[in-house]
Image (cartoon, rainbow, N blue to C red):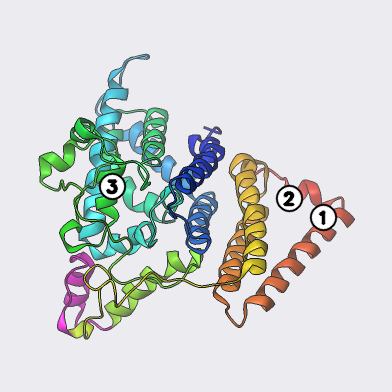
């Protein structure tokens, strides 16, 4: 399984983002802000880079259950594993997605995808590092039913790819198709924090599940995007960490272990007295919480943009050829990617320590390149098989 469909699709993702930019300009609409898109793309890079360190273990867990606990073994070439996988992945995703909005523990992971206050194709790439961990239990019944690992892997990847195109404001309502499949209009509702839109439209591909379980809502009022309590940062690494930090801080304020467990399993809408006073919500009071924005200036924007391109190229190379690296080399490369994203966001937001971090990052890169070039024996060590 060296050919990851997600990695292969990366160039097409950026081609379609470019097309969306062109169409938006032709329609005199601004659907992108560089700062917000930096956070979106950075979250995607963070997820895919960190997953290189443990994603194989997740797939191995599925394979283990399929090998030792499956109820059926399908004949080679049978269409049934594919049929079961298409239905099962979509249904499993629906319930994972729904519970990720209804359970604090799961929401602390999934919220990463909803933090953007814009809505465009780049938002589709804004994914949480731990999502594959939280969603896996919802797919394990497929292993028990006998769906081979490779079939599950391909169908799950295709489901993920489908969801890319529905993250756009440039496609209007699609009529009768909205009774069958998830569409941009339906998914805009899902990303909105308008009170009437909250907790709706959880589908991946087929809208059947929302119709069946009563969570379907059509787009009527203009959506307000983001989360009720905004991140207020474009740092993609902090975006992954902050919700978990917030969850831990809330649990520490719980008056008892029972209340802490109850909070973990409760809806994010539940606000017990011991949690303190409520803060303004973006969807309820958008004027009190306008979009978070910064103005880094054109020179700094161009510099961070150039560095982001380098980071994306490095991340794509890691996705494609990571199996050729030793584990220490892979960890080092992933760490450099993460530090690069933190430094880029800090520069955009004008943090006092941003320039020092960027100088240290570039210095570390120059040192690493010099060591590799000056010590030829280091090459085979870095490329050692894991």
Label 2 Cα crowd, 10 Å radius (few <14 / some 14-19 / many 20+): some
The disc, 1 or 2, on the residue closer to the chain's N-terminal end is: 1
Q: Mark 3 = which residue? A: 187
Judge by depth and name the residue closer to the eye, 15 or 29: 29
Q: Mark 2 = which residue? A: 382
Give how far apart the Cα atoms at labels 3 and 1 are.
47 Å
The local secondary structure at tag 3 comes to: helix
**Does 216 sit above or below residue 12?**
below
Query: Disc 1, disc 2: CB below 8 Å?
Result: yes
Magenta segment: 253-273
Q: Quadrant of the C terminus?
A: top right
Q: Mark 1 = which residue? A: 372
Q: Position of residue 79 (x, y in %)?
A: 31, 17
The disc, 3 or 1, on the residue closer to the chain's N-terminal end is: 3
Q: Is residue 64 rendered magenta in the image? A: no
Query: Is 58 situated left or right of 296 in this image?
Result: left
Query: Disc 3, disc 1: CB below 8 Å?
Result: no
Judge by depth and name the residue closer to the eye, 228 or 120: 120
């Amino acid at each position: 399984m060296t050919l990851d469909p997600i990695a292969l699709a990366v160039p097409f993702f950026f081609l379609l983002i470019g097309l969306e930019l062109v169409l938006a300009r032709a329609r005199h609409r601004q659907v992108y802000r560089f700062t917000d898109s930096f956070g979106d793309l950075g979250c995607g890079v963070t997820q895919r880079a960190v997953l290189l360190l443990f994603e194989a273990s997740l797939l191995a867990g599925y394979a283990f259950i399929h090998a030792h606990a499956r109820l059926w073994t399908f004949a080679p070439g049978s269409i049934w594993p594919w049929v079961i996988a298409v239905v099962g992945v979509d249904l499993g995703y629906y319930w994972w997605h729904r519970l990720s909005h209804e359970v604090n523990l799961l929401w602390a992971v999934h919220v990463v995808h909803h933090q953007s206050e814009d809505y465009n194709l780049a938002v589709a790439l804004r994914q949480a590092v731990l999502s594959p961990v939280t969603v896996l239990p919802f797919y394990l019944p497929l292993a028990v039913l006998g769906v081979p690992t490779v079939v599950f892997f391909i169908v799950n990847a295709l489901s993920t790819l489908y969801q890319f195109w529905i993250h756009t404001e440039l496609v209007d309502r699609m009529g009768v198709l909205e009774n069958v499949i998830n569409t941009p209009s339906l998914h805009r509702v899902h990303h909105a924090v308008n009170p009437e839109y909250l907790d709706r439209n959880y589908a991946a591909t087929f809208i059947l599940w929302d119709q069946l379980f009563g969570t379907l809502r059509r787009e009527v009022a203009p959506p307000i995007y983001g989360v009720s309590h905004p991140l207020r940062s474009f740092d993609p690494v902090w975006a992954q960490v902050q919700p978990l930090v917030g969850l831990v801080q809330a649990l520490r304020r719980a008056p008892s272990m029972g209340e802490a467990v109850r909070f973990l399993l409760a809806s994010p809408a539940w606000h017990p007295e011991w949690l303190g006073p409520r803060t303004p919500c973006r969807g309820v009071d958008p004027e009190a919480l306008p979009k978070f924005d910064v103005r880094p200036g054109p020179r700094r924007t161009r510099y961070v943009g150039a560095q982001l391109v380098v980071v994306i190229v490095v991340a794509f190379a890691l996705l494609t050829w990571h199996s050729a690296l030793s584990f220490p080399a892979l960890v080092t490369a992933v760490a450099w990617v993460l530090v690069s994203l933190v430094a880029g966001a800090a520069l955009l937001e004008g943090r006092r320590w941003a320039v020092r971090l960027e100088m240290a990052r570039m210095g570390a890169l120059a040192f690493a390149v010099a060591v590799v070039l000056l010590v030829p024996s280091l090459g085979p060590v870095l490329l050692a098989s894991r």
